Image (cartoon, helix red, strand yellow):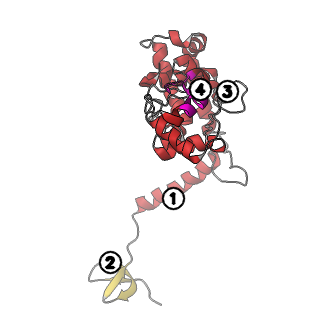
Amino acid sequence: MSEQRYDEETGQYTTGHTYDGLEELNTPLPRWWLWTFYATIIWGIGYTIAYPAWPLISGATQGVLGYSSRAVVAEDIVEHEAQNAALVEELTGTELASIDPASDLHRYAVARGGAVFRAQCSQCHGSGAAGVQAAGYPNLLDNAWLWGGTVDEIAYTVEFGIRNDNPDSRYSEMPAYGDIFTSDQIAGLVEYVQALPQGTGGEAAELFADNCAACHGEQGEGMPEIGAPNIADAIWLYGGDAAAITETITNARFGVMPAWGERLSDADVRAVSIYVHSLGGGE
């Protein structure tokens, strides 16, 4: 068993271990470092006593000081709401269309609505609101609106949603023409639709006039009041290539949007509607 010894040549203590001609020094840590280390241990023990720290089965120790980060956040929210109470009251009591875009109220609504959009809407419509065509999430930056793009129409859509369980939600339904038309007729309709607003004539023109024009219009211009899209403007919710249009005509589409009025406050619904309208695609 090796023992500590003093090396007169180097003037240092060694542990007595030698490896490959090298001796292991026994150099103690500086006293100030040791006291600092001991102090951090004492501080750590005190912290776990004073603040929430040790995990339990269904929670954690609360700490003798009763500190809660959730309570701090709640206090900050209350303080924030108090600071903006006047603007919130004005926002909920003013007709949306009459709000001046240059006003402090509009700037507040856009800022608040942007936060709501990023937290609740961006998952489907994208962080930039450009939508995801392959999945049927609409682009909110253009002027193509299924149910109208005025700020009031947007607010209604946000509040009540589309094709959900809310009795006031937007609702429309396209038939699945795969159960009605032959594959050749559907192929002809696809060609006809892709050529709109001119169309291609023949049997496809008759099929369109008899089955589609009632909702989409004679020239495919759409009817926002019933949620029928414009199919002559080259803007497609699910894609405008032959395969996508064939799928739409054959099996129809049935996109759903939640009724955000059931989850958000009236102020948040109004704010996010103003925000979406301010992106440039509103009517």
Mark 1 or mark 3, earlier in chain:
1
Q: Which mark is residue 38?
A: 1
Q: Is residue 213 in the magenta section? A: yes
Mark 3 or mark 4, earlier in chain:
3
Mark 1 in CB contact with mark 2 (< 8 angstroms): no
Mark 4 in CB contact with mark 1 (< 8 angstroms): no
Give the CA separation, mark 3 to mark 4.
19 Å
**Nearer to us in this view, 17 or 143:** 143
Q: Nearer the viewer, mark 3 or mark 2?
A: 3
Q: Which mark is residue 215?
A: 4
Q: Does residue 1 lie above or below 44 as drawn?
A: below
Q: Where does residue 205 sit, x and y in percent of width and height? A: 52, 32
Task: Determine the secondary structure under disc 3.
Answer: loop
Mark 3 or mark 2, earlier in chain:
2
Task: Determine the secondary structure under disc 1.
Answer: helix
Q: Is residue 57 in the magenta section? A: no
Mark 2 or mark 4, earlier in chain:
2
**Nearer to us in this view, 242 or 161:** 242
Q: In the orientation shown, which residue stands out farthest toward the left?
A: 9
**Is residue 22 shown to the viewer in this render?**
yes
Give the CA separation, mark 1 to mark 2.
26 Å
Q: Report the amino acid beneath label 3.
A: Ser
Residue beneath label 2, please? 12
Q: Residue at x 57, y 10 (%)?
A: 94
Q: Report the amino acid beneath label 4.
A: Cys
Give the CA separation, mark 4 to mark 1.
79 Å
Q: Where does residue 53 sit, x and y in percent of width and height? A: 63, 50
Mark 4 or mark 1, earlier in chain:
1
Q: Which mark is residue 23?
A: none
The magenta-colored residue range is 206-224
Residue beneath label 3, please? 169
